[in-house]
Amino acid sequence: MTGFAHSVVSRTERFSGRVFSVVTDRVTMPGGGAADRDYLRHVGAVGVVALDDRGRVVLINQYRHAVGGRLWELPAGLRDVQGEDLSAGALRELAEEADLRAGRIDVLLDLHTSPGMTNEQIRIFLARDLTPVPAAERHDRTDEEAEIEVRWVPLDDAVAMVFAGEITNAAAVSGLLAAARARDLEWAPLRPADTPTPA
């Protein structure tokens, strides 16, 4: 590991939207020069591996326009509520997308989704002690979420779906594999829900 500290000489914003912006940073390089680096600045996200007492996880299937099709995923969403605790955001997404509440939530892993092109970071939680949201209190899903399909899948079957190429969403792949490994280690790798995120 070298001791060189890259620094940003200048930043140009190319696009600004609700979820992300596109910027070009001019960054100092070890050889004495500087280079332009384009990337997406993202608000971040949270996701949930929801595991019931029968060893099943909740998967959702929804349309993703960027890939032109439907993907199997974990309940997840943006960190776009000002001041919201990450675990609270994860529980909100679990309720909105899967109609579930959790009595216990722990940190499973932190993930940079694609660090070559974005600073997006997602924290994946493990949620247990699940109960359904009462019908009268359920979230009214709109847009792509209106067509969400919710499926309960044994955790080992979900892992098999990963290796079969049936689950390709990065957060889902990472979360499911991490959950299976954590289960095999009797949950020793889990961290408290309020653990600070990496810098």
Image (tube, rainbow, N blue to C red):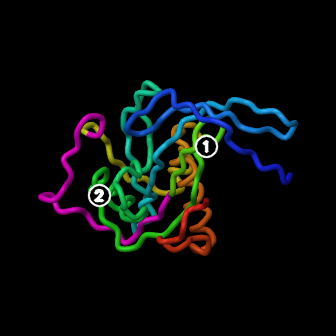
Q: Read off the residue under disc 1.
A: 163
Q: Is residue 66 left or right of residue 25?
A: left
Q: Quadrant of residue 182?
A: bottom right
Disc 2 marks which amino acid? Ala
At 38% from the left and 45% from the top, the residue drawn is 60
Q: Is residue 24 magenta?
A: no
Q: Amino acid at mark 1?
A: Phe
In this picture, residue 50 sits left or right of residue 162: left
Q: Residues within 10 Å of mark 2 (few under 14, many from 20)?
A: many
Q: Which residues are magenta?
A: 124-145
Give the SS element for disc 2. helix
Query: Circle 1 — which element?
Result: helix
- In the image, taking residue 108 as reference, residue 100 lies left or right, namely left
Report x, y in % for residue 138: 19, 55
Which residue is the site of mark 2? 95
- Magenta stretch contains residue 135: yes
Crowding at mark 1 (Cα within 10 Å: few <14, some 14-19, many 20+): few
Which is closer to the viewer, label 1 or label 2?
2
| Quadrant in which residue 143 is drawn | top left
Residue at image location 12% in from the left, 58% down from the top: 136
